[in-house]
Image (cartoon, coloured by chain):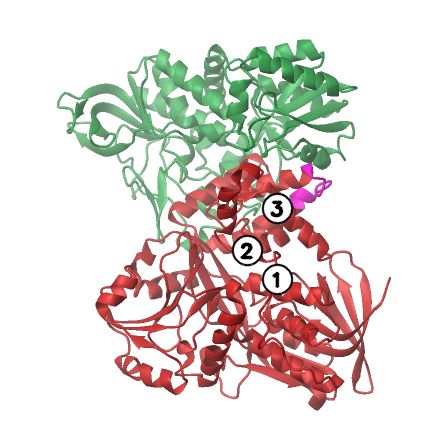
Chain colours: A green, B red
């Protein structure tokens, strides 16, 4: 690194991962696990906005709102109809293997996930609807277990955490679960603050045992006949499982977390676990930096300039995985007339004009045409040029930037990110 | 079920209807105002918020031009709380019709409209954003007016004088005997209840729905429906109202509205009043046309677009809707065989008071009341009711009274919990239900950059915690609220605003599964 000009003696690596969302993190993990020297660059990804749930495949066809209990059968169905869906480039064994690798990594980093391997799980969302997902943080698992049995249950919210209303969940869900009860309790040690709290402040504060004691006291008074307690997902930042065990022991009933709207603590936990674990595996990370310039040099290598002046880095890499996300992640950008890919100006599959981007209804079950826009790839996850050939031998794409899926409606966001990252890393090894 | 009785039934809670309610109440006439949706649900809510100096109409509609001039002067004195005296600037650029520019001063003076030519330098000094291609610039007395505040305050004063306001109440029929309407059948669209209102006089002030309402009494009115679309920027881009100096056309006015600017309009003939919304084509046209005078509009961030339908009275000739007079018409339906039925429609926001006056004069004549019109002299009382519609007010109050204030529910417009509570209470007193839509109409909620993403969630949760929402009402409300926001957003989603919309969809569909 030098000040004022790019380094004359560049950093070298096997793989540059552009993006720090779920796909970027997963790609860096798979690469590091396979011995590739890996550099990761990008702004803080969508991951901190993630609910913490890892979807695989939940709804298809979206127009029919068909919800699948078996995500693997749902994948067969979607791939059968949409041969360009990202899952079409992977076998189910590969998809499962990608999840196994990520989940075991997260577990080592102290973030345990639970799943029914063959099936989706159903859980309460913060609006009292029930939601289908695949992998659930252990902190939420008692909620998944309780939902079908519907025992007497207390849902408690915190005064001032205004994105989460226990009463709303109970009111909305009561016709299905009559023994639900709501309570709004003051959060320990925040009586002096008038502002709205965000989950991360509460989570940090519960890392202190004195605050946990107060919370336990307050919940003990209200537990009454409840056989299980649901709380917003703010139960600690780093020691959630221990904190939940402590609560359960002292109160005497199982406790579960319910995801909250962003910025969500489970998303922050995921982000931190990845950063910590990848760093330990030797992935060189350039957080809050962007690739500002990139070009191909001799043969199949790329030179990337990372960051803005005065501090810039020059990197020589053999391969690149583009996991820069969609519009929110700024992997794609739209002006009034067309959608562009921001780093390589790759061709973007898109509707013919802006009038066709969005439906007349935000909640249109069939989704918006723009959601299927993105980068098209070959079976080795390489972006294609306009004639359908890979643009570069060792440029790969993964995650939500890929065309032909609607992660929000198909409920396949994390799955597509993790599995396509897996596919892209495997392809990069094959072509190295 | 109780039946009601009143001297005058006013149909329609827009600027004219609420203005008429106030006018009649000030003359001591007892009235009921029925509105099928909510205040300003029609053209009164879907316009530029422009207080016309009249200069725009000097070439094609001098009668309207003069009416605008005199009414604008009155409103500046009598309702200053609803008006921002921005002043106006008419700008001609290269390529504009030079004959029109040359005739403009004379046309204005014929209508008594004061204008002042200014130099290039002064024009750039006043509005640094205008185009280098400027060839002529005139100062005028145009201003900005808040139509929601205006109607809410007119209504509030009418209510304080005994007028009864029924919202979500729709007229479904008239009982007619011997050339008179005796009873009006109305339906409460929320409860499904029907009611009868015995009346002495009916005034149909339902704006663009005037022909539909009149048809219920078998009276034919020929109207044209002209849709106009407008765009709202994220930030205010000019100090003054900026007009293109040319005959009225598409995309030629930029009006500042507090912290934002509003661009418009278009004129598209529509044949149905259902599902009226802006199109991508209109949005692009407005941006391109106005960017000729303010080039920065090409790069500006837009938060939403909206449409209103102008009620135009059908003239003999056909052709461009802009050639149809923007003047108003009072129909005394005695000529159609109904002696106690009056329709007032057409016109402009700027002339709403005059329209109300003329309709009230006719009604008073019919019932033999000779009290003079007081809205000519009586200032519009400023009440609390309409105040939270003002852009920028909520943040100012919040900053000033921070210590005592509750948490912020809408971060874009800085609306704390207790302002929402205040509005909910107000709506309750108006006999309305506190739907999100109603709260949004009375505040800046959902009108900022995030277009309801954050406040939608927080207000829902808050209303549940307050015990105002029950069962799954929150889902019903949020869908309606998001649907309403989306109508405005859909056509302006590119750049930063597309990113924002993606976040909204990720939240409400990805996490909350509202589409399922």
- The x and y percentages for residue B497 are 42, 47
B194, B379: nearer the viewer: B379
In the figure, is residue B31 to the left or right of A237? right
Cα separation, mark 3 vs mark 1, equals 17 Å
Q: Residue at x 35, y 50 (%)?
A: A335
In the figure, is residue B298 to the left or right of B26? left
Contact, mark 1 vs mark 2 (Cβ under 8 Å): yes
- The x and y percentages for residue B185 are 79, 70
Q: Which residues are magenta?
A: B465-476
- The x and y percentages for residue B393 are 50, 51
Residue A383 falls in image quadrant: top left
Q: Earlier in the sequence, mark 1 or mark 2?
A: 1
Location of the C terminus of chain A by quadrant is: top left
Q: Residue at x 70, y 44 (%)?
A: B473
B359, B248: nearer the viewer: B359
Disc 1 residue crowd, few under 14, some 14–19, many 20+, Cα 10 Å: many
Cα separation, mark 3 vs mark 2, equals 12 Å
Which residue is labeled 1 in the image? B152
Q: SS class of the residue under badge 3?
A: helix
Which residue is labeled 3 in the image? B420
Q: Earlier in the sequence, mark 3 or mark 1?
A: 1
Location of the N terminus of chain A by quadrant is: top left
Cα separation, mark 1 vs mark 2, equals 10 Å
Contact, mark 3 vs mark 2 (Cβ under 8 Å): no
Q: Chain of mark 3?
A: B
Which residue is labeled 2 in the image? B389
The answer to whether any part of residue B321 appears in the image is no
Disc 2 residue crowd, few under 14, some 14–19, many 20+, Cα 10 Å: many
Q: Which residue is farthest right?
A: B1
């Amino acid at each position: 690194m030098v000040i004022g000009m790019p380094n004359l003696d560049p950093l070298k690596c096997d793989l540059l991962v552009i993006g720090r969302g779920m796909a970027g993190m997963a790609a860096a993990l798979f690469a590091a696990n396979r011995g590739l020297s890996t550099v990761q660059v990008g702004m803080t990804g969508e991951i901190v906005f993630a609910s913490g749930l890892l979807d695989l495949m939940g709804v298809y066809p979206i127009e029919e709102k068909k919800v699948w209990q078996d995500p693997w059968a749902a994948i067969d169905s979607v791939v059968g109809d949409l041969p360009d869906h990202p899952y079409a480039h992977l076998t189910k064994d590969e998809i499962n293997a990608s999840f196994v690798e990520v989940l075991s990594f997260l577990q080592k980093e102290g973030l345990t996930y639970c799943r029914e391997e063959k099936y989706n799980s159903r859980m309460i969302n913060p609006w009292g609807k029930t939601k289908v997902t695949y992998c659930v943080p252990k902190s939420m698992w008692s909620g998944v277990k309780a939902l079908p049995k519907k025992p007497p249950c207390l849902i408690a919210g915190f005064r001032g955490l205004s994105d989460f209303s226990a009463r709303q969940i109970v009111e909305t869900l009561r016709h299905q679960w009559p023994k639900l009860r709501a309570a709004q309790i003051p959060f320990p040690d925040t009586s002096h603050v008038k502002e709205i709290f965000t989950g991360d402040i509460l989570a940090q504060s519960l890392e202190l045992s004195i605050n946990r004691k107060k919370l336990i006291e307050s919940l003990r008074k209200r537990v009454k006949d409840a056989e299980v307690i649901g709380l917003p997902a703010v139960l600690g930042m780093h020691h959630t499982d221990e904190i939940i065990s402590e609560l359960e022991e002292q109160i005497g009933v199982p406790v579960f977390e319910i995801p909250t709207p962003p910025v969500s603590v489970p998303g922050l936990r995921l982000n931190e676990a990845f950063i910590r674990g990848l760093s330990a595996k030797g992935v060189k990370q350039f957080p809050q930096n962007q690739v500002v310039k990139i070009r191909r040099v001799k043969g199949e290598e790329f030179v990337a300039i990372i960051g803005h002046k005065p501090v810039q880095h020059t990197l020589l890499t053999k391969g690149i995985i583009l996991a820069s996300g969609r519009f929110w992640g700024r992997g794609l950008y739209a002006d009034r007339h067309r959608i562009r890919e921001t780093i390589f100006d790759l061709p973007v599959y898109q509707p013919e004009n802006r009038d066709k981007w969005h439906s007349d209804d935000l909640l249109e079950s069939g989704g918006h045409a723009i959601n299927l826009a993105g980068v098209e790839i070959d079976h080795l996850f390489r972006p294609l040029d306009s004639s359908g050939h890979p643009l570069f031998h060792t440029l790969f794409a993964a995650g939500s930037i890929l065309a032909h899926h609607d992660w929000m409606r198909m409920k396949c966001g994390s799955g597509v990110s993790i599995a396509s990252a897996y596919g892209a890393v495997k392809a990069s090894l094959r072509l190295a | 079920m109780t039946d009601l009785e009143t001297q005058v039934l006013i149909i329609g809670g827009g600027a004219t209807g609420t203005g008429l309610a106030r006018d009649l109440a000030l003359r001591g006439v007892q009235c009921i105002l029925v509105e099928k949706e909510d205040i300003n649900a029609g053209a009164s809510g879907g316009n530029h918020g422009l207080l016309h100096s009249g200069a725009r109409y000097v070439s094609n509609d001098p009668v309207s031009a003069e009416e605008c001039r005199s009414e604008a002067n009155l409103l500046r004195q009598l309702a200053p709380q609803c008006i921002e005296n921005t002043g106006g600037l008419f700008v001609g650029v290269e390529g504009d019709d030079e004959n029109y520019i040359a005739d403009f001063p004379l046309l204005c003076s014929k209508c008594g409209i004061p204008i002042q030519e200014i130099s290039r330098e002064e024009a750039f000094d006043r509005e640094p954003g205008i185009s280098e291609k400027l060839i002529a610039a005139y100062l005028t007395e145009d201003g900005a007016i808040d139509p929601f505040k205006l109607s809410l305050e007119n209504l509030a004063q009418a209510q304080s004088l005994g007028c009864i306001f029924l919202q979500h109440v729709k007229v479904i029929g008239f009982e007619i005997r011997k050339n008179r309407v005796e009873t009006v059948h109305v339906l409460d669209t929320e409860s499904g209840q029907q009611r009868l209102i015995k009346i002495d006089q009916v005034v149909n002030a339902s704006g663009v729905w005037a022909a539909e309402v009149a048809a219920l009494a078998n009276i034919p009115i020929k109207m044209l429906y002209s849709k106009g679309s407008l765009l709202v920027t994220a930030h205010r881009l000019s100090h003054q109202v900026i007009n293109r100096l040319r005959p009225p056309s598409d995309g030629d006015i930029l009006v500042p509205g507090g912290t934002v600017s509003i661009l418009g309009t278009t004129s598209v003939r529509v044949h149905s009043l259902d599902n009226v919304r802006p199109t991508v084509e209109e949005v692009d046209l407005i941006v391109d046309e106005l960017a000729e005078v303010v080039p920065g509009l090409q790069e500006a961030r837009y938060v939403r677009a909206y449409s209103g339908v102008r009620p135009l009275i059908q003239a003999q000739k056909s052709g461009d809707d802009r050639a149809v007079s923007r003047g108003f018409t009072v129909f005394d339906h005695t000529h159609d065989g109904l002696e106690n039925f009056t329709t007032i429609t057409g016109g402009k926001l700027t002339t709403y008071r005059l329209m109300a006056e003329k309709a009230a004069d006719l009604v008073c004549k019919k019932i033999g009341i000779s009290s003079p019109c007081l809205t000519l002299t009586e200032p519009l009382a400023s009440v609390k009711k309409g105040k939270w519609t003002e852009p920028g007010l909520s943040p100012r109050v919040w900053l000033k009274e921070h210590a005592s204030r509750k948490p912020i529910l809408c971060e874009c417009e800085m609306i704390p919990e207790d302002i929402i509570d205040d509005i909910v209470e107000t709506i309750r007193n108006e006999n309305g239900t506190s739907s999100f839509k109603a709260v949004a109409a009375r505040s800046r909620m959902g009108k900022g950059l995030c277009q309801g993403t954050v406040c939608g969630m927080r207000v829902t949760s808050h209303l549940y915690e307050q015990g105002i929402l029950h069962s799954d009402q929150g889902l019903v409300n949020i869908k309606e609220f998001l649907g309403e926001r989306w109508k405005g957003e859909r056509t302006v989603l590119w750049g930063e605003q597309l990113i924002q919309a993606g976040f909204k969809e990720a939240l409400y569909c990805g996490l909350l599964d509202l589409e399922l």
